[in-house]
Amino acid sequence: MNDNILVINIHSSRNVGDAALLQVTLEQLKNNFPSSAITLCMDDPESHTGLETAVHSIFSWVFPFRISSKTSWNYWHLAMLLPATLLPILGYKFFNKKIWLFSPKSIREIINSYLDADLVISKPGGFLYSSGHGISLLVAMYSIIYAHLAHKPIYIFPQSIGPFKRWWEKRIIHWMMERVRILMVREPISYQVIKNIGIRNDQVLLIPDTAFTLHDAGHEAGESWLKGHGIDPQVGAPLLGCTMINWGAQNTDFKLQSEYEEACAQAIRYFVEKLNGRVLLFPQVWGPLPSQDDRIPAHRVLEKLHDISTEVMVIDEPIQAQLLKSIYGWMDLFIGSRMHSNIFALSQGVPVIAIGYLHKTAGIARMVGIEKWVIAIQQTQGNVLRDKLAELWPERRVWREKIKSCLPDLIREADSAGKMVADDYFGNWKVIQRGS
């Protein structure tokens, strides 16, 4: 039972969605592997505050995060990635000795974390999709493939997969996914992507996003936080919560950032002027890179609303996941560009208008039954978002009950990921290893 577990593909705890996914992953692993040691491979290990050992990831070795300066690929590390990582594995396999000839000290801790692991878990999330020139996807895939090359059993927690723009991306994904023990996808669109690629792995499972299982900090904690910021949620104006995303800065293919922000501003104006409401723009993500900081587009939206700025508040302080979920529970409605902000709000029964920048948003919405209230970020121009808000407001109580009715099954299914891994690892993998 004292197995070493390596959790890979963790981005940063400055992303509340990532932090929530990591927290529930650790809880499920500790419940099902109670005596095991857990190591985390993170792009931003300095952001982790838990007791687990956190080391840098393969991704951060080739794309180091320099928060205070311009961040870019380390092309020398990219060129050296294969010899630096493969030679130690080959030496260990054939000579029982790691050969560090091409491996600088900066990557040895990462390599050792793979070689010392008994099983590898790819954290839930949504990083396996085409972007830019495909380098990010290649490195993300290699972080999983490397576990296979090290002959470790691989389990992928609930994941969004795709879209893919290039034939070779699909080919590598197909090869890789056929070699994992269990592949969990978190919404039906990704499940169909996997099937369309031709993956026959009978261990492909549709499991809801594990953030649905995150415990909140309590209803009173959310109320206390709001009152501490001058808002009594039980008295006065209705509340609209929002999250923004600087998608144009993260994806060069998206050219409509200004139009998207203008649409959000119009919807907020409608809520304030027509419904006599107050609006809070929350930082679901505040780094590690400036392009990932939600507060930047939120302040640009606030500038468009200077004449009603007393009713619109940008929250600049980072808020931890459980408390944020409690605060969202006090909102009357929510407009979320960050998918996990939508999941947090839905988990509290709050009706949501979800703005999707990848298909994961529409996929999650389908599982909850709120497809009607999803808008692609490319389609937010004009009055579409404002009109959607006006349509939802009089129906909000009906939708609150619909959302609440489907939550128990979603939470129960999402809570099963860790047990599925343990059942396969102890019941199948270790049996095979003992017999070989």
Image (cartoon, rainbow, N blue to C red):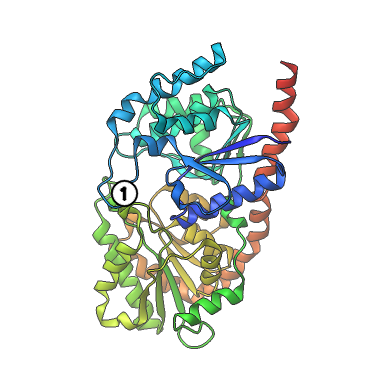
Q: Quadrant of the N terminus?
A: top right
- Residue 248 located left or right of residue 160: left
Q: Residue at horizontal 55%, vertical 12%?
A: 95
Residue 37 position within the rendered picture, expressed as x and y whole percent measured from the top left: 64, 40
Q: Residue at horizontal 50%, vertical 63%?
A: 320
Say whether residue 366 is visible: no
Q: Residue at horizontal 41%, vertical 68%?
A: 317
Residue 180 position within the rendered picture, expressed as x and y whole percent measured from the top left: 58, 29
Establish if 163 lies above or below 396. Answer: above
Look at the numbered disc 1 and give the secondary structure of its residue.
helix
Residue occupying the far top of the picture = 94
Residue type at mark 1 is Gln
Say whether residue 376 is visible: yes
Which one is nearer the viewer's eye here, 148 or 265? 148
Which one is nearer the viewer's eye here, 392 or 131? 131
Establish if 435 lies above or below 342. Answer: above
Label 1: few (<14), some (14–19) or many (≥20) C-alpha neighbours in 10 Å: some
Q: Residue at horizontal 68%, vertical 53%?
A: 412
- Residue 308 located left or right of residue 423: left
Which one is nearer the viewer's eye here, 333 or 11? 11
Residue ID for mark 1: 250
On the image, which quarter does residue 313 sit in? bottom left
- Residue 117 located left or right of residue 315: right
Residue occupying the far front of the picture = 105
Residue 301 position within the rendered picture, expressed as x and y whole percent measured from the top left: 29, 69
On the image, which quarter does residue 152 sit in? top right
Q: Quadrant of the C terminus?
A: top right
Circle count: 1
Residue 422 position within the rendered picture, expressed as x and y whole percent measured from the top left: 70, 38
- Residue 282 located left or right of residue 305: right
